Image (tube, grey):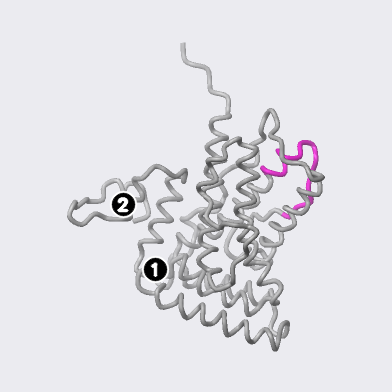
Amino acid sequence: MSRSDDWLHAPHDPRDPNPWLALYLDASGPLADDVKCAWLADAACRSRQFLLPVVRPLARLAIVLIQLLKILMPNDLTSSRLLHGTIVWGMETFVRPEANWLILRHFHLGSQVLSFIGTNALPGQVLPSQPLHPADIDALKDDVFLQHDLNLFNFVINLNRALGGKHIVPPDKLDFSMIQQPAPRLADMPDRWTNFVDLQTAIELYTPIYQLFLTDNDFWRATNSLQLDEVIGIYAATLLKRQDYLVFLNNKHPLVPLTTLRAGFRLVLHGLSTEMLHALLSRAKALDLPQPPACS
């Protein structure tokens, strides 16, 4: 199932309830319907049920072995070009359309969230930035995965230096102009018979590849960037004056970095947190827009 109509008309057997139907009908989270449909369709697929339990322990073993290799050869196998080319080939050839769409969306959403925080935390100032808006999967070859990690750390450093040790103060009027739905469409994602691998399995497979073709320092920085979900969430919640929104964050706590073994799972949580935060900002933008005059 990947459309709302499929979920709404799905049969319900009280003796054997569908857990994915329950999650779709649950309205406690802010995700837009098309995103929730894609996320649940990907999570409910057979690849995640049968392939992920096999791939995950093997991928984590590979991380340990590559870490040992990096002690002897810390920079000998590094190649960002080969890394991104391999990931793009895998996405186009093996990854499900819903997973590819969610991955592609992630870079757009991340750039919009950082722009929202920077614009409203420092009115009238422009922080140095390198926003990522890949139009399609092939555009990811331009070091997009690596640049995404760099953007997070650079943003936190530049923002707090500009704040000069002060806390963020919400402006009288928030600017939501950068918050919008990304251009990439689910219908444009590769959908051949070979595209069967779900999001979580794909990320578990890519994590040791990411580690292999990056320097040890780059890989550790990339995994530690996941700890910044809490930080970015606090910035946004402060501007929105809604600290309760932090309940949707999952990668806690920023001052207690975790090992790289669970990086794949935490990366999925990072993607979901970004979707949740963008959905909350989209909801706040809709409420902030002036209402059309009532018909007389």
Please, which residue is most extreme toward the top here?
A: 296
In the foreground, 111 or 245: 245
Q: Which mark is residue 28?
A: none
* Residue 194 shown left or right of residue 185 in the figure: left
Give amino acid for label 1. Answer: Arg
* Residue 243 shown left or right of residue 5 in the figure: right
Residue 206: quadrant of the picture: bottom right
Find out whether residue 196 is within the magenta segment. no
Label 2 CA crowd tier, 10 Å (few <14, some 14–19, many 20+) = some
* Cα–Cα span, label 2 and label 1: 17 Å
Give amino acid for label 2. Answer: Leu
Q: Which residues are magenta?
A: 116-130
Q: Secondary structure at mark 2?
A: helix
Q: Which residue is mark 2?
A: 21
Q: Which residue is mark 1?
A: 48
* Residue 272 shown left or right of residue 76 in the figure: left
Q: Secondary structure at mark 1?
A: helix
Residue drawn 69% across and 46% down? 115
